[in-house]
Image (tube, grey):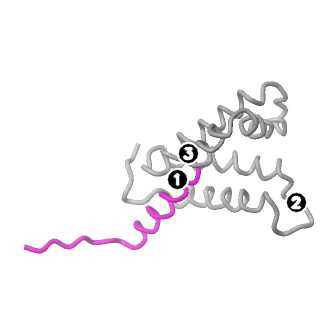
Amino acid sequence: MSTSINFDSENFGKLFIRSFLGIFFIVKGVHCFANGRTALTTLGTTFSLIGVHFSPLLFGAVLAILHITCGLAIVIGFFFKLSCFLLGAISLLGTIAAGFPSKSIINSSTYMFTISMVTTGMMFIGSGRFSVKK
């Protein structure tokens, strides 16, 4: 008795991108916690762009937790569009904080802009068939 697994290339591609995008955000959040106060404070200072100038350490910890939980939600496909929206907005805010519109094409904010656009695109594409639906 043979069984065949039908790998739909569209849904398998979404699973592939979703997995690596979620793992990227999980690793980024864990990395911020592993580097301690300085990394969390640096991450929390991005909130100064929207007018929040107090307690960057607290907001850095909130952002790191958001990266981990939304990254996990992206991997399993649970609240996928909400997680993509939150991480896309945070990544775009980080891109602006790092000074994206500069004269140099390749700088430290280029990869965050790319991740922001990929996350936003995935929000519109959807999670695919291989996911836990809400």
- Magenta stretch? 1-26
Tell me the residue that label 2 is attached to.
101
Q: Are the residues at dot 3 and dot 1 in contact (C-beta closer than 8 Å)?
A: no
Identify the element where label 1 is drawn. helix
The total number of labels drawn is 3
The residue at 49%/58% (across/down) is: 18
Tell me the residue that label 3 is attached to.
83
In space, the residues marked 3 and 2 are separated at their CA atoms by 26 Å
The secondary structure making up most of the magenta span is helix
User: Residue 93: x, y in percent?
Assistant: 76, 47
Q: Vertically, is 62 above or below 78? A: above
Q: Quadrant of residue 30?
A: top right
Identify the element where label 3 is drawn. helix
Identify the element where label 2 is drawn. loop
Tell me the residue that label 1 is attached to.
23
Magenta includes 22? Answer: yes
- The quadrant of the rendering that contains the N terminus is bottom left
Q: Quadrant of residue 64?
A: top right
